[in-house]
Amino acid sequence: MGKKIVAVDFDGTCVEHRYPDVGRDVPYCFEVLKRLEANGVKIILWTMRSGKTLQDAVDWFAQKNIPLWGVNENPEQIETKWSTSPKAYAPIYIDDAALGCPTVTPMPTPGEFEREYVDWRAVEKLLQSKNYL
């Protein structure tokens, strides 16, 4: 297998949906991301955020001590110029909006609509089946 790379969305994947703010951590996300990093997996932050809101997401990873290999790009793809596509190459993308990505719906807080977010325990099993964990 080639280099292990995972592109990870932010809102609804790492944190609950509260854009433009940073929501609460999605349960078990931190633990799985740290295990990926410990296994030598390169992590790309793949998000629609830009400007200050993008920096907020980058800061979230830094505060969690989870190194990012790339932010909205695959550095190797850019350096070697093997593709000029704006889509960052990764063998695996984890995104709450991806068809088939396991999600959970939290209990709504009074007065708020709660959106689904990634079920990291189910994602962990999928990553194990792909030998990423």
Image (cartoon, rainbow, N blue to C red):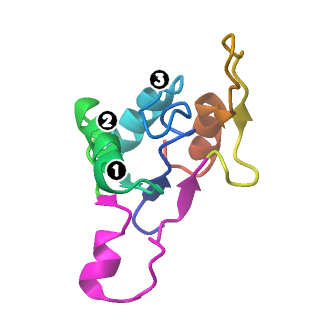
Q: Nearer the viewer, residue 53 or 45?
A: 53
Q: Residues within 10 Å of mark 2 (few under 14, many from 20)?
A: some
- Distance between the Cα atoms at labels 1 and 3? 16 Å
Q: Residues within 10 Å of mark 3 (few under 14, many from 20)?
A: few
Q: Secondary structure at mark 2?
A: helix
Residue at x-position 66% and y-position 12%: 109
Using the image, determine if residue 107 lies above or below residue 68.
above
Q: Position of residue 41 (x, y in %)?
A: 38, 51
CB atoms of marks 1 and 3 within 8 Å: no
Q: Nearer the viewer, residue 5 or 29?
A: 29
Which quarter of the picture shows residue 16? top right
Q: Counting residues from the N terminus, which is met first, the one under dot 1 or under dot 3?
A: 3
The disc placed on residue 24 is 3
Q: Nearer the viewer, residue 2 or 22?
A: 22
Residue at x-position 44% and y-position 40%: 20
**Residue under numbered circle 1:** 54
Was residue 13 drawn as part of the magenta stretch in this picture?
no
**Residue under numbered circle 2:** 60
Judge left or right: residue 130 versus residue 71. right
Identified by mark 1, the residue type is Leu
Identified by mark 3, the residue type is Arg
Magenta part of the protein: which range?
70-95
Q: Nearer the viewer, residue 44 or 23?
A: 23
Residue at x-position 38% and y-position 63%: 72
Q: Counting residues from the N terminus, which is met first, the one under dot 3 or under dot 2?
A: 3
Using the image, determine if residue 71 lies above or below residue 65.
below
